[in-house]
Structure formats: C-alpha cells, structure tokens
C-alpha cells in the first residue's frame, strides 16, 4: 500500500506512556541520507531512524516520583509498514510514515521514591518501552 516517504526534518512523535513510566516527551527530527530529494529535502532510508535521540526527558514511575528522573528517547524498531518493500535508495529500504514504531526510554538518572523511610530509593528500571509515530512534511511523494 502506498504511503508518504519520510524526509529530512520530519518529526518523530513519542507517546508519553512507557509501561509504568510517564515521560515528558519532546519531538525528535529525522535526518535523511538517501540519494533522492523530495521538496528539496533528502529522503530517509533504513538506518536513519537509529540516529534519532531526544536526551534530557524527565520521567516518573509510581512510586518513584520525587524527584523525577531523566533519560533519552529513541526508536527501538520500525513497524513493517514503515519500510518500503519496493522503493530503495543506496540499496536500503526507503522509510515511510506507516503506523507506530516501538520506542525506548533509556534512564540516565533514576527517579526516586520519597521517604519515609529515609533515604529516598531509586527506580531500578533502566529501560522502558513505548511507541511513537512520524509526522511528515511530504505531501507529494509516496512509496510502497
């Protein structure tokens, strides 16, 4: 099925729910490395999604709420409908808007469980899984 091809500058939108954790999400941006251009911007190919990181996002995961922790958002894996089966660039699949990808939140500073009893207890989870979608500025070129 035809879907819009992703290009440099398209947004990566993370959902705030990562299992038990709620993350203060911010959008990421794609940078394409394909050969072709759409609307003057380079198309995205398989592997470009791995370069998207959004550091410094806060999170809580009850009962670990005060102070909140922080970490980095990234894309763990794409859905099958987000990689073109026929359209390729540099021998790699072109990325498509598709449905939802799997995201990950890597904890850098753990959230804490407030006392009592003292001292505060850190969250032991270091990785949370969630989802996200792409928003594209390309309303012209499609691929399959």
Image (cartoon, rainbow, N blue to C red):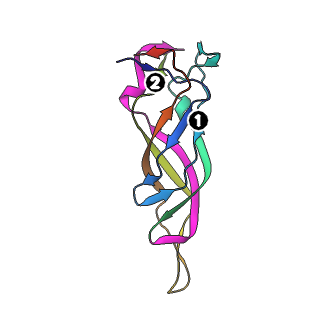
Q: What secondary structure characterizes most of the magenta part?
A: strand
Q: Position of residue 144 (x, y in %)?
A: 39, 16
**Quick one: which residue is furthest to the bottom in this view?**
117
Which residue range is magenta in the image?
63-91
The residue identified by callout 2 is 96
Q: Nearer the viewer, residue 125 or 11?
A: 11
49 left or right of 77? right
Q: Secondary structure at mark 2?
A: loop
Whether residue 66 appears in magenta in the rendering, the answer is: yes
Q: Secondary structure at mark 1?
A: helix
Asked if residue 14 is positioned above or below residue 96 in the image, the reply reads below
Q: Position of residue 125 (x, y in %)?
A: 46, 62
Choose top left, top right, bottom left or bottom right for residue 7: top right
The residue identified by callout 1 is 51
Residue density around tag 1, few if under 14, some if 14–19, many if 20 or more, within 10 Å: some
Q: Nearer the viewer, residue 76 or 143?
A: 143
Between the C-alphas of marks 1 and 2, the distance is 16 Å
Q: Which residue is drawn at the image coordinates 50% and 25% (left, top)?
A: 46
Q: Nearer the viewer, residue 126 or 140?
A: 140
Q: Position of residue 69 (x, y in %)?
A: 57, 63
Q: Between disc 1 and disc 2, whose residue precedes?
A: 1
Asked if residue 126 is positioned above or below residue 90 in the image, the reply reads below
Which one is closest to the eye, mark 1 or mark 2? 2
Q: Quadrant of the N terminus?
A: top left
């Amino acid at each position: 099925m035809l879907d819009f091809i992703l290009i440099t500058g398209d947004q990566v939108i993370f959902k705030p729910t990562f299992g038990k954790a709620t993350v203060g999400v911010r959008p990421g941006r794609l940078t394409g490395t394909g050969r072709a251009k759409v609307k003057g911007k380079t198309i995205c190919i398989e592997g470009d999604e791995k370069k998207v990181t959004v550091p410094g996002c806060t999170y809580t995961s009850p009962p670990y709420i005060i102070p909140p922790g922080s970490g980095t958002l990234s894309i763990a894996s794409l859905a099958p409908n987000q990689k073109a089966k026929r359209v390729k660039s540099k021998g790699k699949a072109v990325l498509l808007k598709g449905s939802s990808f799997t995201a990950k939140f890597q904890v850098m500073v753990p959230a804490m469980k407030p006392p009592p009893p003292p001292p505060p207890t850190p969250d032991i989870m270091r990785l949370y899984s969630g989802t996200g979608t792409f928003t594209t500025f390309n309303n012209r070129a499609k691929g399959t």
